[in-house]
Amino acid sequence: MTYRLRSVSALLGITDRVVRAYEEASGVSIKRANETNPASPPARVFDPFSLFEIAQWRRTSGAVKTPESGPIIISTYVVKGGTAKTTTAVETAVHLQAQGLRVLLIDIDVQANATQILGYEPDLTEDEAPDYGVSSDAIVRDTLASYLVPYIEALNKNSGTLNLSSTVTRAIKKPFGEAGPHLLPSDAFVSDVEPALFQAKGQRELMIRRLIDASKSGGLPGFDARNYDVIIFDCPPSVSLTSAAALAASDFVIAPIRLDSFSVKGLAKLMSELSVLERNYQLKPEIIILPTFYEPTIARINRMHKQLSTYRDLLAPCVISSSEDFPRSLSSYLPLSLQKPTSSASKEYSIFAGYLFEKILSKGAEKARKVSE
Ligand SMILES: Nc1ncnc2c1ncn2[C@@H]1O[C@H](COP(=O)(O)OP(=O)(O)OP(=O)(O)O)[C@@H](O)[C@H]1O
Ligand SMILES: [Mg+2]
């Protein structure tokens, strides 16, 4: 995948002139299109790796604000299938990273759709990979279960020793290099999280929250939440202890609501799950409702959008339009925003990520204030 300057400025949200200035100042090496044909004008040719390197250089040069409190945790969740939870998790991760934050996406859905969109093969073992022409790096070896199951076992036994697999140090995948968004992938074994949570002694719903805290004190090889500004959990559509534990760890819950179906009902279920968390643990993640599959020409959809406005402050001031580009993009194993950075679908997710970015900064300031009080 290669890009011209215009696509890069669209993704980074800055002008062509500023991208050129950053390219020079950062020293990131960008190929020129006339390297093979000296007669053509010397156009820059970027790829996802160089694009994210420039984004991260912006961050280290101080041009980007980051949350003061350390990582802000987000879940994409609503109790309804196919509302664009995974699409939102992945596209938002790409845009937040391009806008200068450091993002870790954690796939906790056994369907492993986010894992696949980012180019990994949850269904193949290391032995099978060569038969399918798949590289060994594209295989999923570890998931959240590789950390959480031994963590809960150790807590249950009152022992400080974690019995981690030898591959866990390579659990986190970097599909676009160090500077791109990172991924803790999923495969069938992520379903081990559910029974482990069930058997946990004590406050089960708090186990993911506690695991993230343990990583912050350096207790988990290969996973340190302090390396990130944002951690996004892509949740399955069902009510489960796994989703509840992700919600309990979260500062924000993005609820994508499909305007062409009955997913508004899923929102009511989400609210009741969150009220249980508040009652039991005094935790209150902030809901952000994101309307998806929007089609302005359909009256019924407009009516549903108006109905959602009763949620006022929870409703994002933007929508994601219905676009065939999304399902079409799935066969390329690359997020749509990286396939078509100048498409209107990518622009809409960029606008949503910009809105979320501001909320992440305010939440970071609020958390930092609470710690210092
Ligand atoms: N705005 C959109 N317009 C059209 N199709 C979309 C849009 N967003 C997502 N899709 C497509 O809808 C399907 C479901 O999307 P996605 O997998 O993100 O939903 P989900 O809520 O994560 O589903 P699940 O509940 O199974 O986890 C996918 O084929 C995706 O490409
Ligand atoms: Mg999904």
Image: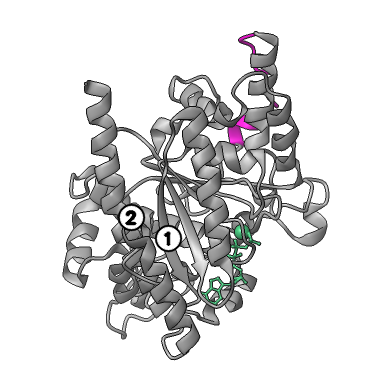
Task: Judge: label 2 CB < 8 Å from ligand 1.
Answer: no
Residue drawn at x 46%, y 25% is 213
Residue 316 screen position, x and y as percent = 35, 63
Residue drawn at x 47%, y 89% is 298
Q: Is residue 21 above or below residue 339?
A: above
Residue 135 screen position, x and y as percent = 69, 53
**Is residue 202 at all visible to an observer of this figure?**
yes
Residue 142 screen position, x and y as percent = 67, 38
Relative horizontal placement of residue 346, taking residue 143 as reference (left or right): left
**Circle 1: residue type:** Ile
Residue drawn at x 63%, y 22% is 151
Residue 181 screen position, x and y as percent = 45, 50
Q: Nearest the camera: 63 or 313?
A: 313
Q: Main secondary structure of the magenta part?
A: loop
In the picture, the disc for residue 356 is 2
In the picture, the disc for residue 32 is none
- Examine the structure image and report whether residue 165 is included in the region drawn in magenta: yes
How many neighbours does mark 2 have within 10 angstroms: few (below 14), some (14-19), or many (20 or more)?
some
**Can you tell me which quadrant of the image ligand 2 is in?**
bottom right
Q: Nearest the camera: 32 or 60?
A: 60
**Is residue 143 at all visible to an observer of this figure?**
no
**Magenta-tinted stretch:** 159-170
Q: Is residue 313 above or below residue 349?
A: above
Q: Are the residues tagged 2 and 1 within 8 Å (C-beta)?
A: no
Q: Earlier in the sequence, mark 2 or mark 1?
A: 1
Identify the residue position indicated by label 1 in the image.
289
